[in-house]
């Protein structure tokens, strides 16, 4: 059985320390973009679970420049960690949804900051035109780049329910084009989406495992105030996963991933004052410790059930 610094899964921390030789931190930025699922190009209202800040609730303040946001977030990080390198992480909304000249300017403003060793771009697979890919490929020759795609589910029926705004085939096409350019990718999956059963969630993980992605982020569905999903919850159409159910899903999912795939996240954060449920998710470190214990107790490790 392979381990990664004592963990039974290939952690992001292990990967970054091996690649850069020291601690590396994400500096989450808001590039001031919107989303085609909000402005009418792909839909209105955004995905039903998405917050008013476009899933950038912990990112910098879009009222400030990229440079100032970076400095402000870095200062907060330094209260906990005194030294390290940085990933400029464009997190909020869709970070390739703008003219290429604007993207170039904002990305460059971030990557020239002292200590930046990588650029991470969160976006949608339907917002990766060739000129955008040209830019990302160009930057990837200067420093490490990865693109994050919010797949959430491989089930197209669920995708309609959550108002994702694109089909699975669009994701597959984007992955093929990114892989051809050797641009690393991280794919997001959400467990607990309305109407999904265990089989749907495992199918999503299997699809990501065979997509050519270098990394995965697994999130627990958080119900947040003022999101479209609240109405479905009030109608009784949304049932929260229990902590035990979630942990079992996580351990089985990780066992089905290839050893080389980097696990960027096993559960997500939500602002306490915005969260409706599940409330057990607020105890993040307790959940992560319980996941580690489940791996040990059941002798599960990444890759053991992956089929090429």
Image: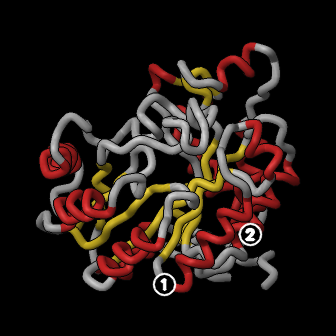
Colour option used? secondary structure
* Image coordinates for residue 49, horizontal then vertical, percent: 61, 33
Q: Which residue is mark 1?
A: 181
Quadrant the C terminus occupies:
bottom right
Q: Nearer the viewer, mark 1 or mark 2?
A: 1
> What's the residue at 29%, 67% (across, down)?
23
**Mark 2: few/some/many CA within 10 Å (<14, 14-19, 20+):** some
Q: Residue furthest top?
A: 234
- For numbered disc 2, what is the local secondary structure? helix
> What's the residue at 79%, 43% (across, down)?
158
> What's the residue at 40%, 71% (across, down)?
131
Above or below, 209 against 153 in this view is below
* Image coordinates for residue 171, horizontal then vertical, percent: 65, 63
Whether residue 84 is visible here, answered yes or no, is: no
* Image coordinates for residue 214, horizontal then vertical, percent: 55, 75
- For numbered disc 1, what is the local secondary structure? loop
Question: Which label sits on residue 255?
Answer: 2
Quadrant the N terminus occupies:
bottom right
């Amino acid at each position: 059985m392979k381990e990664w610094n004592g963990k039974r899964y290939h952690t992001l921390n292990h990967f970054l320390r091996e690649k850069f030789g020291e601690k590396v931190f994400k500096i989450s930025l808001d590039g001031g973009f919107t989303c085609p699922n909000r402005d009418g190009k792909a839909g209105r209202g955004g995905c039903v679970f998405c917050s008013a800040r476009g899933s950038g609730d912990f990112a910098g303040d879009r009222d400030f420049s990229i440079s100032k946001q970076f400095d402000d977030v870095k200062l907060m990080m330094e209260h906990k960690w005194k030294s390290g390198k940085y990933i400029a992480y464009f997190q909020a909304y869709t970070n390739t949804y703008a003219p290429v000249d604007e993207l170039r300017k904002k990305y460059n403003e971030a990557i020239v900051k002292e200590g930046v060793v990588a650029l991470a771009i969160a976006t949608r697979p339907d917002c990766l035109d060739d000129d955008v890919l040209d830019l990302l490929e160009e930057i990837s020759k200067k420093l490490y780049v990865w693109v994050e795609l919010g797949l959430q589910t491989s089930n197209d029926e669920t995708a309609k329910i959550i108002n994702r705004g694109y089909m699975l085939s669009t994701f597959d096409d984007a992955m093929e084009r990114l892989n051809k350019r050797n641009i690393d990718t991280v794919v997001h999956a959400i467990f607990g989406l309305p109407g999904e059963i265990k089989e749907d969630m495992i199918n999503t993980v299997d699809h990501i495992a065979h997509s050519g992605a270098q990394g995965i982020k697994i999130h627990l569905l958080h119900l947040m105030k003022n999101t479209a999903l609240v109405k479905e919850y009030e109608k009784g159409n949304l049932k929260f996963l229990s902590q035990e159910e979630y942990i079992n899903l996580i351990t089985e999912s990780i066992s089905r991933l290839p050893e080389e795939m980097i696990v960027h996240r096993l559960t997500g954060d939500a602002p306490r004052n915005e969260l409706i449920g599940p409330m057990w998710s607020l105890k993040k470190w307790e959940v992560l410790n319980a996941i580690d214990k489940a791996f040990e107790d059941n002798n599960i490790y990444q890759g053991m059930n992956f089929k090429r």
